[in-house]
C-alpha cells in the first residue's frame, strides 16, 4: 500500500459493493453499489473537505468555546471552528490510524488517543468496516478508557450520501425523529422542540428542495431506526440504520449542496457542557457504536 496525505487507501469488495477506507481519520473514502456512488467520495491526494467520512472521537460535533467542566475542573480545548467558536469533531480526524487486520471485505483500524491539555484521559479506539453482499457496509467504533479516572466521551461518523450526481435539493428524505434542537448563532443547542417547528419534520418522506439543514435530531425510536435518502429520477437510494439516540443532518451548503451528510451520534452537540447523551467511561470500561449503510433494493 502506498501512502498519500490521506494515509493508506484500503479497498474492500463484497458482491456488488465496493468501499475504500482511508487510514487518516479512519475515514470512509468511498462506497459504491453496482459501480455508482452511495457516498460522496473523498479524494486521497488532497485535504478532505468537510470531514468527509471521518470517525469522530472522543466527541462529535461542537464543544462551545472549546471549554467544559468535568469532575470539578474546567478544561480548555483548541478552537478549530472559528466561525462558531467551537472545538469541532474530536481528536482523531487528522491522525493516522493503524491497520490491525484486513481481508477482502473487512478492515480494522486502531488508534491510541493520548492524554493532552483539554482532554486528559487515554483511550484505545477501534474502527471496523465490514462489507456484506446483502447487508452493505457495517461500521463499528469501539473505545476503551485505559486510564485511572472516569472520562467524558462521545462518538459519531460523518458520511455524506450522494446519489446519481444530483444535488441535495432533489433528494427525498425520511427521518424518524420527533425532535430537533434550536440553536444559537454559534450552532450551540438551546432546547429541543418538535421537528415541525423548525420545518424539519421528515417522518413522512418529503423532498429536501430548498431546505437549509444543519440540524441535530433526537426523539428517535427505541432500538434500531432507519434514515432513507432517495433520488426519484434515478430510483437510487441509501438506507442508514443505527440505534444511536442522536443524528445530525446537513445539506452540505458549505460544499455546494452536492450531498447530504447523515451523521449518527451517541450524544448531542455540546454534550460535554449540557450532558445530553454524554457517556461517562469508567476506567477499563468500553463503549460500542455502530451503523450500517446499504443501497435501497
Image: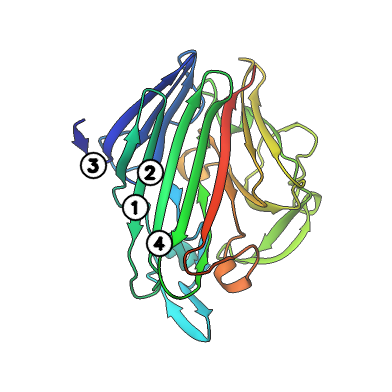
Disc 3 and disc 4: Cα gap in Å? 24 Å
Tell me which numbered mark, 3 or 4, is placed earlier along the sequence.
3
Disc 4 and disc 2: Cα gap in Å? 15 Å
x%, y% of residue 191? Answer: 72, 66
253 or 76, which lies in front?
A: 76
- Identify the residue position indicated by label 1 in the image: 111
**Residue, far front:** 284
Q: Nearer the viewer, mark 2 or mark 1?
A: 1
Tell me which numbered mark, 3 or 2, is placed earlier along the sequence.
3
- Which circle marks residue 5 in the picture? 3
x%, y% of residue 61? Answer: 52, 57
Q: Nearer the viewer, mark 4 or mark 2?
A: 4
**Residue, far bottom:** 72
- Image quadrant occupied by the C terminus: top right
Q: Is residue 139 visible?
A: yes
Tell me which numbered mark, 1 or 4, is placed earlier along the sequence.
1
Other residues around mark 3 within 10 Å, as few (<14) / some (14–19) / many (≥20): some
Amino acid at each position: 500500500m502506498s501512502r498519500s496525505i490521506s494515509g493508506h487507501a484500503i479497498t474492500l469488495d463484497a458482491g456488488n459493493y465496493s468501499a475504500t477506507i482511508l487510514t487518516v481519520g479512519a475515514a470512509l473514502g468511498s462506497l459504491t453499489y453496482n459501480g455508482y456512488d452511495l457516498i460522496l467520495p473523498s479524494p486521497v491526494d488532497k485535504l478532505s473537505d468537510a470531514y468527509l467520512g471521518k470517525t469522530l472521537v472522543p466527541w462529535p460535533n461542537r464543544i462551545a468555546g472549546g471549554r467544559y467542566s468535568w469532575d470539578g475542573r474546567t478544561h480548555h480545548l483548541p478552537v478549530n471552528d472559528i466561525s462558531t467558536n467551537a472545538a469541532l469533531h474530536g481528536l482523531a480526524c487528522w491522525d493516522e490510524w493503524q491497520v490491525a487486520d484486513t481481508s477482502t471485505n473487512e478492515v480494522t483500524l486502531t488508534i491510541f488517543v493520548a492524554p493532552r491539555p483539554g482532554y486528559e484521559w487515554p483511550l484505545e479506539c477501534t474502527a471496523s468496516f465490514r462489507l456484506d453482499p446483502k447487508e452493505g457496509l457495517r461500521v463499528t467504533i469501539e473505545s476503551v478508557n485505559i486510564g485511572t479516572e472516569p472520562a467524558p466521551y462521545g462518538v459519531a461518523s460523518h458520511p455524506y450520501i450522494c446519489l446519481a450526481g444530483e444535488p441535495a435539493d432533489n433528494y427525498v428524505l425520511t427521518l424518524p425523529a420527533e425532535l430537533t434542537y434550536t440553536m444559537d448563532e454559534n450552532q450551540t443547542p438551546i432546547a429541543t422542540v418538535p421537528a415541525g417547528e423548525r420545518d424539519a419534520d421528515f417522518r413522512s418522506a418529503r423532498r429536501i428542495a430548498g431546505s437549509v439543514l444543519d440540524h441535530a435530531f433526537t426523539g428517535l425510536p427505541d432500538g434500531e431506526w432507519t434514515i432513507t435518502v432517495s433520488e426519484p429520477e434515478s430510483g437510487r437510494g441509501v438506507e442508514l440504520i443505527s440505534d444511536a439516540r442522536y443524528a445530525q443532518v446537513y445539506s452540505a451548503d458549505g460544499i455546494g449542496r452536492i450531498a447530504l451528510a447523515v451523521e449518527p451520534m451517541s450524544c448531542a452537540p455540546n454534550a460535554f457542557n449540557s450532558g445530553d447523551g454524554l457517556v461517562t467511561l469508567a476506567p477499563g470500561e468500553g463503549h460500542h457504536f455502530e451503523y450500517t449503510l446499504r443501497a435501497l433494493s
